[in-house]
Image (tube, helix red, strand yellow):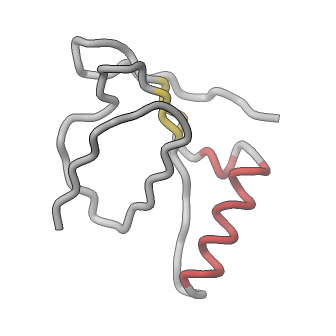
Amino acid sequence: GFSLAVLEPSRNLLGFSLAVRGAGLRDTGVAGLCAAVSQAAGPASEVGANLYVTPPSARALAAHYDDHDVLVLQLSGAKRWEVWS
């Protein structure tokens, strides 16, 4: 089963977000997706998953950078994504 282990309020005044860190450790479906991405990326790749549910017109995170590769899958709604390299 899926456990909601972490609830984090967004630091944005527009609303709250639900964040589930380490989702691949908590749900077999997400774990399977992580395993498939890891296999496609190569044996030295470490793949994990975080899930975010954010209301319309809100942000889960402020602009930031990650020190690792990130694959974003948006499953519902519409957002404007800005990506810099």
Compared to 10, does 49 lie above or below?
below
Instruction: Report the front residue among 54 and 23.
Output: 54
Residue 5 x/y as whole percent = 61, 29
Instruction: Report the front residue among 12 and 22.
Output: 12
For the N terminus, which image quadrant? top right
Name the residue located 71 percent from the left edge and 30 percent from the top edge. 3
Q: How many numbered marks, from 0 up? A: 0
Name the residue located 49 percent from the left edge and 24 percent from the top edge. 18
**For this view, does 24 lie left or right of residue 70?**
right
Name the residue located 27 percent from the left edge and 58 percent from the top edge. 66
Compared to 13, does 10 lie above or below?
below
Residue 31 x/y as whole percent = 71, 56
**For this view, does 29 lie left or right of residue 41?**
right
Name the residue located 53 percent from the left edge and 28 percent from the top edge. 6
- Residue 71's quadrant in the figure? bottom left
Instruction: Report the front residue among 15 and 23.
Output: 15
- Residue 85's quadrant in the figure? bottom left
Residue 15 x/y as whole percent = 33, 12
Compared to 6, does 63 lie above or below?
below
Tell which residue pokes out farthest to the right in this image: 1
Residue 78 x/y as whole percent = 40, 34
Tell which residue pokes out farthest to the front in this image: 78
- Residue 13's quadrant in the figure? top left
**For this view, does 4 lie left or right of residue 21?**
right
Compared to 81, does 33 lie above or below?
below
